Image: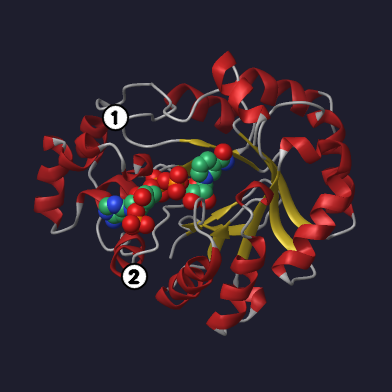
């Protein structure tokens, strides 16, 4: 595993395990499998409704809590009650501190939510605080009018949606880039069958998914692929024994379609559908 240092000096694994759409026993078992396969960073969220199962999977793994880096997110509907929500996440996950808590979306009263997170951070209930799905303008605004600079912005990022301009903004403000949907949610078969990616996979005796994940981690981007399949859980963490050359990275940069799949706050349909979550 490789690590990245956040703007408050905390170290975080550069590759973690995602749990979106993973629920019940399957979630518990696959979190346990992931930890036993070597993952130490686990990403969940209040909105996923699986914090309890994630907590059970962690305990089942038998790994010491201190070795893990647990991330959760506050749903925008809870922004008026952020403190209570985080305290509830602590209970759900059966832990007395969280490594990272993110504001899930820049909707509603995220200023109040941020200030409550700052307070919980000062009380050491959370080791680092950050945001998710924040476009650069909102992020810069939040940074300028608050005390703590977010350690992370978790945004959709993969070979087809690389966020190169956003990455530069994040670097400028010392906010680390965390990629969700690093495999394009597995639905975009063109990503897995793309000729450039397949050729690199053959060259390095790796799979297309491993090339996509290595491409991110080599750029200091934290990736959190999700799988509930034991073999793919192992495959996705086995990416640290090869290095893409600069030239290969440049070719991969050329695959950027600059189009987010999951939606952005600028898309009114998306905001409307999010209100129903
Ligand atoms: N902040 C946010 O708003 C936000 C939004 C979305 C996601 N997230 C976080 O980011 C994590 C990752 O994103 P995601 O789950 O949406 O998408 P993802 O990790 O890009 O893709 C997951 C999908 O890819 C498949 N898959 C996994 N490994 C594979 C491999 N090696 N080869 C082929 N297919 C593979 C999985 O199926 P199998 O399970 O069958 O392997 C699953 O259907 C989430 O789980 C969540 O923790 C955050």
User: Mark 1 and 2 residues: CB-CB less than 8 Å, in contact?
Assistant: no
The residue carrying mark 1 is 253
As drawn, the residue found furthest toward the front would be: 276
Position of 207 with respect to 202 (left or right) is right
Residue 113 position (above or below residue 61): above
Between 192 and 126, which is closer to the camera in this rendering?
192
Position of 195 with respect to 30 (left or right) is left
Q: Quadrant of residue 118?
A: top right
Could you give the CA–CA distance between mark 1 and mark 2, rounded to whole angstroms? 30 Å
Tag 2, which secondary structure? Answer: helix
The structure residue drawn at horizontal position 53% and vertical position 71%, both measured from the top left corner, is: 28
The structure residue drawn at horizontal position 69% and vertical position 21%, both measured from the top left corner, is: 138
Residue 91 position (above or below residue 102): below
The residue carrying mark 2 is 230
The structure residue drawn at horizontal position 24% and vertical position 47%, both measured from the top left corner, is: 244
Residue 157 percent location from the top left of the image? 43, 36
Position of 25 with respect to 38 (left or right) is right
| The N terminus - image quarter | bottom left
Q: Which numbered dot is residue 161?
A: none
| The C terminus - image quarter | top right
Residue 119 percent location from the top left of the image? 90, 47
Residue 100 percent location from the top left of the image? 68, 54
Q: Earlier in the sequence, mark 1 or mark 2?
A: 2
Crowding around mark 2 (Cα neighbors within 10 Å: few <14, some 14 to 19, many 20+) is few
Residue 188 percent location from the top left of the image? 28, 36
């Amino acid at each position: 595993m490789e690590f990245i240092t956040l703007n408050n000096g905390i170290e975080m694994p550069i590759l973690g395990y995602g749990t979106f759409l993973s629920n019940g026993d399957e979630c518990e078992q696959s979190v346990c499998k992931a930890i036993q396969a070597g993952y130490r960073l686990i990403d969940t969220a209040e909105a996923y409704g699986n914090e309890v199962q994630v907590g059970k999977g962690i305990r089942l793994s038998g790994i010491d809590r201190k070795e893990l880096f647990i991330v959760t997110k506050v749903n925008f509907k809870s922004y008026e009650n952020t403190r209570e929500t985080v305290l509830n996440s602590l209970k759900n996950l059966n832990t007395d501190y969280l490594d990272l808590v993110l504001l899930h979306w820049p909707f509603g009263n995220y200023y109040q939510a941020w200030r409550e997170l700052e307070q919980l951070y000062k009380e050491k209930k959370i080791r680092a605080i950050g945001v998710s799905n924040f476009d650069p303008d909102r992020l810069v605004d939040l940074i300028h009018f608050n005390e703590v600079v977010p350690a992370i912005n978790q945004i959709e990022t993969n070979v087809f949606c690389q966020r190169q301009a956003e990455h530069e903004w994040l670097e400028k403000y010392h906010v680390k880039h965390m990629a969700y949907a690093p495999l394009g949610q597995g639905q975009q078969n063109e990503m897995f069958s793309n000729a450039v990616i397949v050729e690199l996979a053959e060259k390095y005796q790796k799979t297309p998914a491993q090339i996509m994940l290595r491409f991110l981690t080599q750029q200091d981007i934290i990736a959190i692929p999700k799988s509930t399949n034991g073999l793919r859980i192992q495959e996705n963490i086995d990416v640290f024994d090869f290095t893409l050359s600069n030239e290969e990275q440049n070719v991969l940069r050329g695959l950027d379609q600059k189009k987010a799949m999951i939606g952005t706050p600028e898309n009114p349909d998306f905001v409307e559908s999010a209100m129903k979550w």
